[in-house]
Image: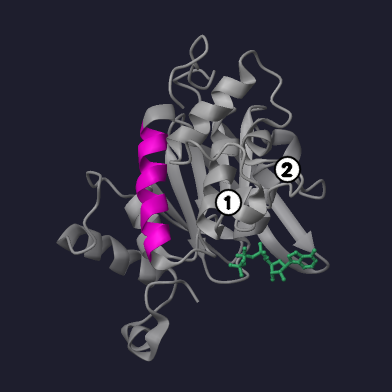
């Protein structure tokens, strides 16, 4: 967020220590093993996208990292920062609170209101502080949710399909906004997405979850903003689609670049 009201600082984490360190994370539902001893490290400021087939356990892993799932084995060895934010596809705003109040609710910090205003300005909603959620479009509501996530200057942002319900144009705008905000605030990010192109557009590193394990761990290494037509982009896309088990025939059948 912009430097206001005494200045906002970046996330307080040591630069050389991983922000996330998971070792042997395991989650079973009955006799089904959804996460099978997953190891994962995320560095400060690193943007990681997590893709995988439907039902592969992406949300399960995200919930485990958010410490929202008490039944995960290996949680004792899980290190995640206290200062983390979670954002979902349907990040409902509180209907009885105006936009600014939604952003700063629970934010117990000096200058909270000014920080909230700056956060709303950052997501392009200056002047909409007093709007009720019902008066905001779906994209605007997600922008308020993004402001709410980032106003706390989290060391870690966990986002589960945050753009899944948005139309294509709004999605592209949100991508640009997120890239810009992450470059400025440098939270580590774990983004769950179905969309391979979204993953490559946004992330420094893309993981493919398959059979309870991280089957592919790929550094993207392309300058931002990324060009979807660039040959290196296409090579990475091909590798990831292979990792997802999507064949050329599947794509001809209309599977596109979204994971099935
Ligand atoms: N509470 C639950 N009880 C039983 N099974 C569950 C429960 N929650 C999730 N699962 C199962 O765990 C598996 C992984 O679910 P999860 O939501 O993590 O997948 P996902 O990769 O995020 O899927 P999608 O991309 O479709 O959202 C699924 O097969 C799901 O049915």
The relative height of residue 210 versus residue 7 in the rendered view (above or below) is: below
The relative height of residue 159 versus residue 15 in the rendered view (above or below) is: below
| Left-right relation of 59 to 234 | right
Which region of the structure is painted magenta? 169-183
Label 2 sits on a secondary structure element that is loop
| Left-right relation of 101 to 58 | right
**Residue 108 figure quarter:** top right
Q: Position of residue 53 (x, y in %)?
A: 53, 71
* Residue at the disc numbered 2: 74
Cβ at disc 1 under 8 Å from ligand 1: no
* Neighbour tally class for label 2: few under 14, some 14-19, many 20 plus, Cα within 10 Å: some
**Residue 233 figure quarter:** bottom left
The relative height of residue 139 versus residue 67 in the rendered view (above or below) is: below
Q: Residue furthest left?
A: 231
* Main SS category, magenta section: helix
| Left-right relation of 137 to 230 | right
The relative height of residue 245 versus residue 18 in the rendered view (above or below) is: below
* Residue at the disc numbered 1: 141
Q: State yes or no: residue 162 in magenta.
A: no
Rendered residue at 67%/41% (across/down):
98
Q: Earlier in the sequence, mark 2 or mark 1?
A: 2
Rendered residue at 43%/31% (across/down):
45
Q: How many marks?
A: 2
Residue closest to the eye, 183 or 230: 183
Residue closest to the eye, 225 or 118: 118
Label 1 sits on a secondary structure element that is helix
Q: Position of residue 175 (x, y in %)?
A: 39, 51
């Amino acid at each position: 967020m912009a430097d206001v009201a005494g200045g906002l600082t970046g996330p307080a984490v040591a630069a050389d220590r991983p922000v996330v360190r998971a070792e042997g994370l395991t989650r079973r539902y009955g006799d089904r093993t959804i996460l099978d001893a997953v190891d994962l490290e995320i560095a400060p400021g690193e943007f990681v996208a997590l893709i995988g087939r439907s039902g592969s356990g992406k949300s399960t892993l995200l919930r485990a990292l958010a410490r929202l799932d008490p039944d995960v084995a290996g949680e004792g060895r899980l290190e995640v920062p206290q200062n983390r934010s979670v954002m979902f596809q349907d990040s409902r705003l509180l209907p009885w609170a105006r936009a600014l109040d939604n952003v700063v609710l629970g934010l117990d910090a000096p200058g909270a209101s000014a920080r909230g205003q700056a956060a709303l300005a950052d997501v392009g909603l200056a002047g909409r502080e007093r709007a009720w959620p019902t008066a905001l479009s779906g994209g605007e509501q997600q922008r308020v949710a993004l402001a709410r996530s980032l106003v706390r200057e989290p060391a870690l942002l966990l986002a589960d399909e945050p753009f899944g319900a948005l139309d294509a144009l709004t999605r592209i705008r949100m991508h640009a906004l997120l890239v810009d905000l992450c470059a400025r605030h440098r939270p580590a990010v774990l983004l769950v997405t179905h969309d391979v192109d979204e993953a490559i557009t946004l992330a420094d590193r893309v993981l493919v979850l398959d059979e309870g394990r991280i089957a592919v761990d790929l550094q993207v290494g392309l300058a931002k903003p990324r060009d979807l037509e660039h040959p290196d982009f296409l090579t990475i896309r091909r590798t990831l689609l292979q990792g997802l088990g999507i064949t050329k025939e599947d794509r001809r059948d209309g599977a596109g670049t979204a994971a099935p």
